[in-house]
Image: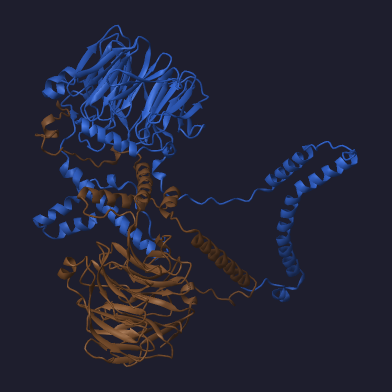
Amino acid sequence: MKVKVISRSTDEFTRERSQDLQRVFRNFDPNLRSQEKAVEYVRALNAAKLDKIFARPFIGAMDGHIDAVSCMAKNPSHLKGIFSGSMDGDIRLWDLASRRTVCQFSGHQGAVRGLTVSTDGRVLVSCGTDSTVRLWNVPVSSIMESNDSSNNSAKPLAVYVWKHAFWAVDHQWDGDLFATAGAQVDIWDHNRSQPVNSFEWGKDTAISVRFNPGEPNILATSASDRSITIFDLRLASPARKIIMRTKTNSIAWNPMEPMNFTAANEDCNCYSYDSRKLDEARCVHKDHVSAVMDIDYSPTGREFVTGSYDRTVRIFQYNGGHSREVYHTKRMQRVFCVKFSCDASYVISGSDDTNLRLWKAKASEQLGVLLPRERKKHEYLEAVKNRYKHLPEVKRIVRHRHLPRAIYKAASLRRIMSEAERKKEERRRAHSAPGSIPKEALRKRRIIEEVE
Amino acid sequence: MGTKIANDVEINPVPAIEKGISEEEDMNVMKYLRGEAANLEVLQDKKLKGQLALREDLYGKSAKAAAKAEKWLMPSEGGYLEAEGIERTWNIKQETIAREVDLLGSRNQYDIILPDLGPYTLDFTPSGRYMTVAGRKGHMAIVDMKNMNLIKEFQVRETVRDVVFLHNEMFFAAAQKKYTYIYDRNGTELHCLKEHGAALKLQFLNKHFLLASINKFGQLHYQDVTTGEMVGNFRTGLGRSNVMQVNPFNSVVAVGHSGGTISMWKPTSSAPLVKMLCHHGPVTALAFHSNGHLMATAGMDRKIKLWDLRKFEVLQTLPGHTKTMNFSQKGLLATATGSFVQILRDFSGSQNYSRYMSHSIAKGYQIQKLAFRPYEDVLGIGHSMGWSSILIPGSGEPNFDSWVANPFETSKQRKEREVHSLLDKLPPETIMLNPTKIGSVKPTRKKEKPAKQEIEAELEGAVEAAKKASFKKKTKGRSKPSKVAKKKKEAVYKAKKPFLEQEAKGEGLSKKKRKNIEEENQLPRSLQRFARKRQAN
């Protein structure tokens, strides 16, 4: 007869000294755990509630400007700094950690319309309604840190005067040229006082310009004739142009998928396009209730932030519909420019009330260094919340955001109006010969034509 | 994937590194998959298909990792008993086993004789470390099984019918003569639960922190022990029942009645989930397997039946009397009657139970309760003269999971676990027959059109109701009989109106159809194609 009984010796299963860690034994057998799904559901519900408790996205405001903030620029080689230009010609460099002005660049006579930093982070280019393009030296980091209490003032490196007011400026990602938008789109070199090249298509002013992050010679502009044009610097004429029903205020290229860009439009939507196939938008991002003024992509390429005339800042997913997050404050008025920080953790918005505001990209994120155990716990809670986020109780909590009354009312009014239009369309279709009224997707509907 | 690798093994000589991969076939991956993979072929949406394919891949990987851990990383191996030659396992006595087994094992075999204090019932904590015993005449004790320490014993001087541990060894509940009480580990009476009254049996639902009790009138009470509120009080309506067990898989409480029926209850509905007729006489014992599919019931009709709970069918019927039954973690079934204990086992995993071991305690002792000790090969027997413990090799799960139940728990770990399990406390609404349904999509129910008879019945019902309605008596000549009769006629017409409208709508369509068919029939055959057709699509 062969017999064996379970016998566990205490030494094998407990720790030897009190300074050792406790021993943990695992058995992943599902029979030992009953009702796993119910436990996961309760954890998802608690995780959603905790998320809401810890959601404090606003970090601080940076005040100093005396007029509305019209444009901002990120320094690609220095994470902590951001440049902002205002409507009275004042340009400042801010230190985000202490939220103070490090350096002031004064010189512009009118509103500063565009700011951009060169690829190596040394030269700041600004343009304004006084028809000048000014180049400034960006103070080096060591000087910035030691002098961050005093307001330094810098002299411009160069001032180039031109024939017309400028609306926007953008620097090449990998080269030495920068482009300005005004009556025409001009290409400048740092050392030349006149544009190297000039592009024009139609008689209308170009209001925004952006270089492609992947392909240094391609740039997209939007004009006041409701068009979006894609130029190639190597060709003499513009490459492609689409005309939409409403004006596009700003364009941002996806840094991870450089063939896609998203356009912030006057009709409260953002349209994502594939630049190779411009006859149809890839997707439409609908959530704002007033014109979208500015747009910027996160360096991960997975989400983007938009600032709108309706006093809110929203964060959208790159391939989705509705916004993931909405930020608003009673004191924040019309948002004119937004930037996503280069480490994808913060969002900076500049608005009409002369303040720049710093927000967290993920509202309930714990800042600072996390212990590995904390990180794992956060990842687990995130995963379990995503698994059950379609269930009604969890969905209700995850989706809930407080909106100011004006925006809530405006959104419901828009919904009612679009519902009414849709119903009328349906009835027209039902009462007419089948096939005489074609169904057109919103992605196509807003484009009037594509011009080669 | 397994077959592909097997083919490669045949054709080419396998280098040493790759041999590890072919051993995948020995691993039990199916156990960890928790069901079948979804059928992604029927999906039209490419984006969803891609996302789900990625997720299914991840599930497969995690199941493989768990199977690998099971194969290589488990610290202990299970117990076994193999008979050699002509001897059979059920002939082997406990004394012979005690002689062959090591010292630690033989310490688990003992008898405690306490002759005057009534039949004893016992309960183990889920980790198997602590045991509480209660004699009918009021003697209660908590024992630490690892060191055989008596933690506390005390006398309450009244009848105690049942005792259960709450979520850990610090608290236990006792069903006493008039009320149910909750005691601390030190013997202090913490609560007197008057709503439960004189309970016959108590059960504790671990994950929901609910204490369930059944009394001699057949009333089922659920109480949340964290907040103290009564979650449900139900009258089972099937008479006296003194058999109650919790199904560990889905936390439904099954009650056995004297009519031979077993009803299963959840705290949020006043009607039972399931009512099944199991035996020709009263149900005497009930036990659930931990996988949730198997239930063993015994009745006064001298039968022990094994049920499949998915189909509610009898798998096997065995003859025998039983007063108490219990399943072990490994699926062994222990039954006891009088002073004889029998242990049944399905040897091939095919749900076919046969004799494995048996044991007779001293003649004249009446066995009251059987309980397998979790994570040990030990069966605890509570009988009329005290309690005993015998060795049943192969009954316990050899490898425990520290996060589920840790027999070597320190007090700090116990406190942390208490807080974590309170945070994960399940609401009573999550109790259902199939707990894997949470998070799945409800199938859409198609609304059927009511049959003609049903419509007529509804019409008649509405007309009756209208006729019966009485009108308020008005003064000043406004309730003359003629006026009242007119009002009544109007009310009947109103009640009929919706049905008439529906009929009219329904008839309209068929009228068109009828018209077309008539026209077609009137025309000669050569001209039938010119009969008025419906609008071309």
Please state, as top left, top right, bottom left or bottom right, where the C terminus of chain A lies in the image: bottom left
Residue A154, image x and y in percent?
A: 22, 77
Vertical comparison of B259 with A67: above or below: above
Residue B236, image x and y in percent?
A: 50, 26
Residue at horizontal 26 percent and vertical 22 percent from the top: B131
Chain letter, brown in picture = A
Please state, as top left, top right, bottom left or bottom right, where the N terminus of chain A lies in the image: top left
Comparing A82 with B454, the one in front is A82
Residue B317 visible to the viewer: no
Q: Could you tell whether B489 is left or right of A29 in the image? A: right
Vertical comparison of B532 with A374: above or below: below
Q: Could you tell whether B345 is left or right of B294 in the image? A: left
Task: Tell me which colouring the rendered structure shows.
Answer: by chain
Residue at horizontal 32 percent and vertical 77 percent from the top: A259
Comparing A191 with A392, the one in front is A191
Residue A29, image x and y in percent?
A: 26, 41
Comparing B168 with B65, the one in front is B168
Comparing A53 with A72, the one in front is A72
Vertical comparison of A182 with B201: above or below: below
Quarter location, residue B208: top left
What color does chain B have in the rendering? blue
Residue B10, image x and y in percent?
A: 16, 57
Residue B368 visible to the viewer: yes
Residue at horizontal 77 percent and vertical 41 percent from the top: B466
Quarter location, residue A199: bottom left
